[in-house]
Amino acid sequence: MAYKINDTCISCGACQGECPVECIKEGTPYVIDAAVCIDCGACAAVCPVSAIEAP
């Protein structure tokens, strides 16, 4: 299972810069590619609105 970004995402881009495998794509909300996500949690740790849900 991969992390997911919910509708509270403000599209700030903080998570995208932290992802070591570049699986987060721009959008409203941003989207995590489940096929690439390694479940590291780096994105969730930097999200200012807690929009990223653990698997």
Image: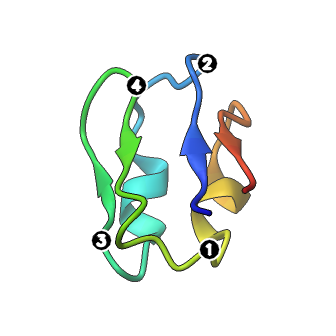
Residue type at mark 3?
Glu
Residue indicated by mark 3: 22
Residue highlighted by disc 1 = 39
Residue for point 40% across, 25% down: 29
Q: Are marks 4 and 3 in contact (CB under 8 Å)?
A: no
Foreground mark, 1 or 2?
A: 1
Answer above or below: position of 23 versus 8. below
Q: Position of residue 11 (x, y in %)?
A: 40, 29
* Labels 4 and 1 touching (C-beta < 8 A): no
Quadrant, the N terminus: bottom right
Q: Earlier in the sequence, mark 4 or mark 2?
A: 2
Q: Quadrant of the C terminus?
A: bottom right
Residue positioned 69% across, 30% down in the render: 49
- The front one of 1 and 40 is 1
Rounded to the nearest angstrom, the CA distance separating label 3 from label 2 is: 21 Å
Residue beneath label 2, please?
Answer: 8
Q: Secondary structure at mark 4?
A: loop
**Residue at the disc numbered 4:** 29
